[in-house]
Amino acid sequence: MKVILKKDVLNLGRSGEIKVVRDGYARNFLMPRAMVEVATEGALRAWKNSEAKRTKRVTSENDALKQLAKRLDAITLSFSRPVSEDGVMFGSVAKSDLIKNLAAADIKVHKDMIRLPASLKAVGTFEVEIALKQDITARIKVAVSAQSK
């Protein structure tokens, strides 16, 4: 099935591209989430007519995301977790902890944006990447310290 991407889709393409995908993938996943529309002649004509407006909107969104990325690059989140006498940390710092602390700073990110393969289970300073868009990323610093008793 030939479709027009309405939004950026990971591992498929960017908004505005015309792609050929399997019928089931389009009907069961992409269309219910309003990520694509079927590439009929009328849809292609309408898509081309609104291209200038869409380009302007995408440019302003990218500028806003770049400003957010600059804000995120300057942020250092601090966490304190209990540690045993052997230096083993009880608990961890997960994506949900990062989301809560960023929300306290009036920054809303989705858990899928945070590229953290596993929870942080050691004391130290770490860099965590946040993918705001496919080509716009930011790195926040996360400092995990031993909790005083």
Image (cartoon, rainbow, N blue to C red):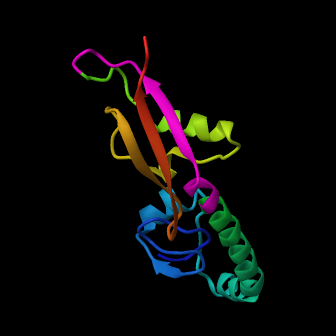
Magenta residues, start to end = 70-86
* Name of the residue lying farthest toward the front: 148
**Residue 122 falls inside the magenta stretch:** no
Relative vertical location of residue 142 with respect to residue 52 in this rendering, above or below: above
Q: Is residue 62 left or right of residue 73?
A: right
Q: Position of residue 56 (x, y in %)?
A: 75, 80
**Residue 71 falls inside the magenta stretch:** yes
The quarter of the picture where the C terminus appears is top left
* Name of the residue lying farthest toward the left: 86
As rendered, which of 14 and 24 lies closer to the eye? Answer: 14
Relative vertical location of residue 72 with respect to residue 8 in this rendering, above or below: above
Relative vertical location of residue 40 with respect to residue 57 in this rendering, above or below: below
Q: Residue at x 48, y 30 (%)?
A: 79
Relative vertical location of residue 70 with respect to residue 101 in this rendering, above or below: below
Residue 64 seen in the current view: yes
Q: Position of residue 43 (x, y in %)?
A: 67, 81
Q: Residue at x 58, y 49 (%)?
A: 75
